[in-house]
Image: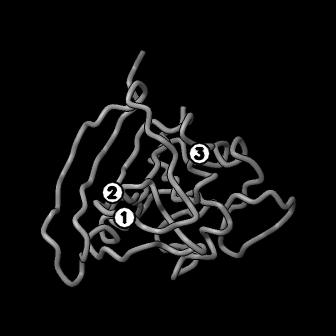
Amino acid sequence: MKNISIIVAVAKNKAIGKDNKLLWHLSEDLKRFKRLTSGNPVIMGKNTYFSLPVRPLPKRLNIVITDILDEQIDNCIMAYSIEDAISKMDGTKENFIIGGASIYRQFMEHANKLYITWVHRDFEADTFFPEIDEDIWKVVSQEDFLETNEKNPYPYSYYVYERRSH
């Protein structure tokens, strides 16, 4: 069983993006993303890959999912289905799913951990995160950052969820 985690920042209304761009810039959240994912594989859809400011993400194995057979992106491992991506993940590390929406949706049943940054505001968006079923997921840690400043203009909280054992 591969160790699969989803990492995402989500608005109160479940919004995660618009026009293939992030909806906000939270400096501390971006630093946390880098700290958690560095040294580990990151798995993403092609649109997410092309939305990254730096490609591929340094100090991480980048696995890009596409449905175009034989498509190649330099310095990335290509996967042509969710199952193919799972087979190419590292069995010894934490594999991070980093987007977009359809990739998150398809990996929800395979993930054993969710790192969610809840941004305490609604945003206009065209891309949303799926519902988190509390019968399946339990919160194991929560940190609140309700003070805002120039680098972090919105209040937010870090939640870590783990899959409940049945």
Q: Position of residue 87 (x, y in %)?
A: 67, 42
Foreground residue among 29 and 146: 146
Mark 2 or mark 1: name the one nearer the start of the chain.
1
Task: Write down the residue under mark 3.
Answer: 105
Quadrant where the N terminus lies?
A: top right
Front: mark 2 or 1: 2
Whole-number angstrom distance, CA of label 2 to CA of label 1: 10 Å
**As rendered, which of 130 and 6 lies closer to the eye?**
130
**N-terminal of the two: label 2 or label 3?**
3
Three-letter amino acid code of the residue under disc 3: Arg
Label 1 element class:
helix
Q: Is residue 129 left or right of residue 113?
A: right
Q: Nearer the viewer, residue 157 or 72?
A: 157
Q: What residue is at 73 percent from the left and 55 percent from the top?
A: 79
119 lies above or below 30: above
Which residue is depicted at the point 40% across and 44% down?
Answer: 114
**Residue occupying the point 63% across, 43% down:** 106
Residues under labels 2 and 3: Cα distance? Answer: 17 Å
Give the secondary structure at mark 3.
helix
What is the number of callouts on the image?
3
Q: Which residue, given by chain and number where applicable, does mark 2 sit on? A: 117
Figure quadrant of residue 13: bottom left
Give the Cα separation between the discs numbered 3 and 1: 20 Å
Q: Which amino acid does label 1 sit on?
A: Phe
- Residue corresponding to mark 1: 33
136 is higher (above) or lower (below) than 152: above
47 relative position to 61: left or right: right
Question: Which class describes the residues within 10 Å of circle 2: few (<14), some (14-19), or many (20+)?
Answer: many
Q: How crowded is mark 3: few (under 14 residues within 10 Å), some or many (20 or more)?
A: some
